Amino acid sequence: MQVFMFHLMPYTAMDMDYGSKWRSSWVVMPNTEFDPAVGHELYNRYLDELELAAELGLDGVAVNEHHQTAYGLMPSPVVTAAALSRRIKTAKIGILGNAFCLREHPLTLAEEHAMIDNITGGRLITGMVRGIGAEYHSMGANPALSRERFLEAHDLVIQAWTRPGPFDFHGEHYHFEYVNPWPRPFQRPHPPIWCPSTGSIETIEWAAHPDRKYTYLQTYSPVKSVATFLNQYRQTAERKYGYTAESTKIGWAAPIFIADTDEQALAIAKPHIEALFNKFLNLSFEMLFPPGYLSPETARRMAIHKRDQLKGDNVTAEHLVREGIAIIGSPDTVRRKLQDAHHLIGFQNFLALLQFGTLSREDTERNIRRFCTEVAPALQQLTDREYAGWSGNSGEAAA
Amino acid sequence: MQVIDSSIESECGRLRVRSQGSGAPLVFLHGAHGMNTWPRYLDLLAGSRRVIAPDLPGFGQSSMSATTTRVHDLARIMLDLLDSLEPTEPVDLVGHCIGGWIGLEMAMRCARLRSLTLINSAGVHVSGVRRGDFFIASPAELPALLFADPLAGERYLQAESAGEFESATFQNRQMAARLAWSPRLFDPELAKWLCRIRVPTRVIWGEANQILPPPFGEAIAQRTGGTLHLIAGAGHLAHIERAHECALATLDQTAAEQTTDTAAALGVSRRI
């Protein structure tokens, strides 16, 4: 299994009582709340943390993109990845993901990814996402056109990376007379493409298509849902497309915290993991799902089921641990839970969110060291031999 | 008075068209929130006029297609609709919000309108005016955003979006975003063309409109050479909140063009 450290780079100095003034830490929280002196310290601290994980033997590190929010300070994950690309010498660098379709000029991202791929000698992983709904408020991109722009931006970027240029490209949304990026990517035919998602059948079917076979990454989910969606990938490949998906094409990303005992780990992590889910991830339904981001029928169903869950302040660390959304405990507990999940689901990629919410520099560093030395090596040994195999039923793993 | 529900084929598929009353034709184009229920405002107009109100493409029970991505696409389809419904008679056109924007696009391209009435119309932008955002507002926040009287707004929005209309409400929001997400509710090119509008134009505006505050109405009136009629105690959905006053202002405009007695027309409307 490939094991990565994933970072969100939250603004930990956020006023946690912002709820009395602003409805969310996204879109509407004034950026006067951002102190550049804190920003300077945080960026450098977070880059140090990722570099430490790479030094301690992880297969890679990963960053992502969010706009105008205290939840994550990486509107351009390309900048983060570029900052890492010279210091991290052998590990992979994942940009998971970049929202190409938020840009009026997705070619600029294609160029930047190709640069990082060249600088690192082919250690870049490109994540392609639509971005969450809030980005459409922040960036002015039309949520009702998001899916078609996503597909078109993808086609443009793949062509830019693989077709000899110059050629012209005329889609519905993007028009270029000369597509001819210098540099071309280092990797052939192009950097591996990953699709992180909180669970979308449409994304799974698209990623698993034989023309693509992109890696699907399940994020922020109870372990049961991880099984459902990752098995869905295998089932889609098998039944819809007639091939057997490799376990390297599926992955899981989850918050991890390790201390000496389960009780200690929970006690330390509790306020920070709850801050992540209740404060940093506090988005209204309308921010998370602007009109057209989902089909009207899906949006209607989501409104019924999700509106209440999105009110914030209602998730406990105990619940997150019970559901397997976060894995918190002693090294033995964390290792065993991940080995068990691998036995049932067989994913060959795991991304550990080792800093979350307000977790301090000291606690994060200890967490990184313990995960990288006491858990990751066991995970890196796992192959399909330890996987129980797929029963053929979506949502059910073999016993 | 009975509302007749029918459908007509168009380039984007089936369009639902409701109509009511008899007399000279008046076409009403609804706004970003659609028109699931038949408003009293149209009842009042139908007292003296044949009111024709399509569900715009992609809204309510009308289809959309790959060709309906922009406001001027909807203007083209509505011009086609006028030609098939009223091939000869001049038409009074009334539009609210996005419907007003479509009306402006139609009037720019068509000489056969007799008048244009714009209620809280989208389409142009005025810099430096603080505006509300109905796309980010929660359902609980919408009444105070769209109405001068939030309680009346709540009752209306509840009736307009609950139960059988729930699906259409999500559909309408998607279509409104498709057309008007960015630039938000306007086309930067449109203002330059408004001087080409030759038909008499009346601009009706809710004084308490937070989505498109009164300076937006002033800008449209100035560019089209139209008259501005402010409605006190009304927000963005002025024709819902002040149905009678908006109907009077609408009939005043269209009747002036018709050279019939406005008061008589209103007399009919008052008997509804």
Image (cartoon, coloured by chain):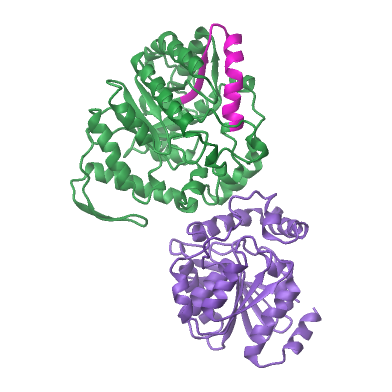
Chain colours: A green, B purple
Q: Position of residue A47 (x, y in %)?
A: 39, 25
Residue at 71 percent of width and 77 percent of height: B247
Q: Which of the 4 image quadrants contains residue A225?
A: top right
Q: Position of residue A41 (x, y in %)?
A: 44, 26
Q: Is B204 on the left-hand or right-hand side of B81? A: right
Q: Is residue B266 above or below residue B193?
A: below
For the N terminus of chain B, the quadrant is bottom right
- Tell me how many marks there are: 0
Q: Is residue A261 magenta?
A: yes
SS majority, magenta: helix
Q: Which of the 4 image quadrants contains residue A117?
A: top left
Which of the two residues, B226 or A130, is positioned nearer the viewer here? B226
Q: Is A286 on the left-hand or right-hand side of B260? A: left
> Is residue B76 in sight in this rendering?
yes
Q: Is residue A41 magenta?
A: no
Residue at 46 percent of width and 64 percent of height: B70
For the C terminus of chain B, the quadrant is bottom right
Instruction: Give the magenta range.
Output: A253-279
Q: State the residue lying farthest toward the front.
A: A37
Q: Position of residue A297 (x, y in %)?
A: 58, 49
Q: Position of residue A139 (x, y in %)?
A: 46, 48
Q: Which of the 4 image quadrants contains residue A123?
A: top left
Residue at 54 percent of width and 6 percent of height: A260
> Is residue B16 in sight in this rendering?
no
Residue at 61 percent of width and 14 percent of height: A267
